[in-house]
Amino acid sequence: QVQLVESGGGLVQPGGSLRLSCVATGNIFSINDVAWYRQAPGNERALVAAITWDGNTNYVDSVKGRFTLSRDNAKSPVYLQMNNLKPEDTAVYYCNAKITDDLRYQYDSWGQGTQVTVSS
């Protein structure tokens, strides 16, 4: 069974950094497009950044220049490096990925979320 697991969240002061990881487990053939979303209390879940299977990235304006997505290949973990964090970045961060397993079944998978809190 294919699953996504996020990690790397925590409490950080404004201006600090965190690196979130999104790892797929199971019999993976490829991890295709991957996106990070976040949901703050009282708000809807919103897209933060996305990366295609071949490394093309997109970011929402509020995180451009501060957040960076990376991946080594189509099976590797996806990392979200978050620098110069602000209190308004506080949210639960979710990874979403389009995954193909070794039987070529395709999944639209979500992780369980990781809490990021930016506070002094």
Image (cartoon, grey):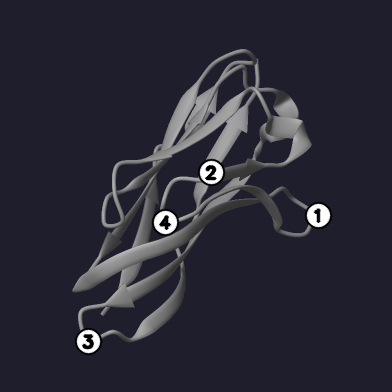
Quarter of the rendering occupied by the C terminus? top right
Decide which of tag 2 and tag 4 comes sooner along the chain: 4
Q: Which residue is mark 4?
A: 53
Reading the image, the residue beneath label 1 is: 42
Name the image quarter holding the N terminus: bottom left
Rendered residue at 63%/22% (across/down): 85
Query: Is residue 22 rendered to the left or right of residue 33?
Result: left
Taking the spot 41% from the left edge, 51% from the top edge, the residue there is: 54
Q: Toward the viewer: 54 or 120? A: 54
Is 50 displayed left or right of 76 in the figure? right
Residue, disc 3: 103
Distance between the Cα atoms at labels 4 and 3?
19 Å
Q: Are marks 2 and 3 in contact (CB under 8 Å)?
A: no
The amino acid pointed to by label 3 is: Leu
Indicate which disc, 2 or 3, sits on the residue closer to the N terminus: 3
CA neighbours of label 4 inside 10 A, class few (<14), some (14 to 19), many (20+): some
Q: Position of residue 76 (x, y in %)?
A: 27, 50
Residues under labels 1 and 3: Cα distance? 40 Å
Dot 1 falls on a residue whose secondary structure is loop
Amino acid type of the residue that numbered disc 1 sits on in the rendered structure: Gly
